[in-house]
Amino acid sequence: MALQLNTIFIVDDDPMAADLLKDHLEKVSKYNVEVFSTGEECLEKISILPGIVFLDYHLNSVKKDALDGLDILREIKEKSPETEVVMLSGQDKIDVAVNTMKYGAFDYIVKGESSFYRAEKAVFNIYRYRKLEGNAAKYKNMSIYLGVAMLMMIVLAIYLQMTGRITNMPGWGG
Amino acid sequence: MEQHIDLSFLKSFTGGDSAKMKKYISMFTGTAPAMIEKIKTDCSSGDWPALKTSSHSIKSQLKYMGADSAQAIAYEIEQLSAKPDNTESLPALVEKLSSLCGSVVAELNEELEKL
């Protein structure tokens, strides 16, 4: 199954923060946005391979035994490695941010009034990153094809020269 | 009379859409009393990790309602409850937060009537 690039999951046990983010992303983009209050609910639907997941770092304020954001991040990256995960947290702590990046998060956003605009920017950055990644793969393939074609032409020219079928190629002796 | 809320963020975020404003304000007024009760219970039972979590939860919602003074107290409770040796001031802070949240909810209910 292909990655659903137009689908965004939001995982947050704070219903107001989740709804505000959903409303904002739906307003500024054409993405389908789904909200989950626990990471476990999100994992049940991860097989649809969402393009982006916004994931709260603290997911145990409602359900004490709920898995936290870091555990869910690891599970998501294991089950859907191409899905980009943006972590959300109320804490502006560098070690928390570094830890989430270490496990494959694309970005880390501190919750607050400006976090909705930063989330919008993260969606744009992910889109741009994927486009650049696609272009890089295209150029890589193109340079391989060009290299092979040039090599074949050189081999053909040498063969023709050696078998005497070409005797007056410019720049070639004999 | 002292104002405990400032809805400028919500107004700007919703572009003045009164249905959305109502939705978010009602979400807060509907859940805040239970959240405050939970904070009080966590404090009276001395469950500091739970108090840290419950004060953290209400903190961001207070911010969206522009209730800065209540949010500052929720932040202080969250910080102090992370240090078990420094909890003696917590009951007074929880009472203060409860009282401020009462005023915040009352003012938000007035705003809801105007919308």
Image (tube, rainbow, N blue to C red):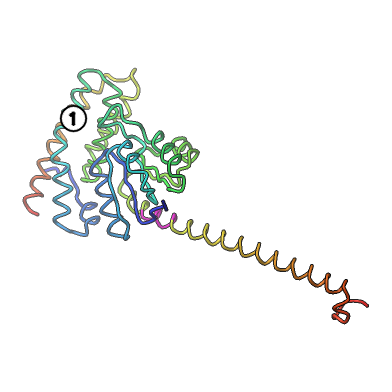
Binning the other alpha carbons within 10 Å of mark 1 as few (below 14), some (14 to 19) or many (20 upward) gives: some
Q: Position of residue A133 (x, y in %)?
A: 52, 57
Q: Quadrant of the N terminus of chain B?
A: top left
Magenta-colored segment: predominant secondary structure: helix
Q: Is residue B41 above or below residue A39?
A: above
Q: Nearer the viewer, residue B80 or A54?
A: A54
Question: Which contiguous range is marked in magenta?
Answer: A120-126
Q: Nearer the viewer, residue B80 or A68?
A: A68
Q: Secondary structure at mark 1?
A: helix
Q: Position of residue B106 (x, y in %)?
A: 9, 41
Q: Nearer the viewer, residue B89 or A18?
A: A18
Q: Position of residue B85 (x, y in %)?
A: 34, 17
Residue name at image x 33 percent, y 29 percent: B79
Q: Position of residue A42 (x, y in %)?
A: 32, 41
Q: Is residue A123 magenta?
A: yes
Q: Amino acid at mark 1?
A: Lys
Judging from the image, mark 1 belongs to the subunit labelled: B
Q: Could you tell whether B113 is left or right of B45 in the image?
A: left
| Residue receiving disc 1 | B96
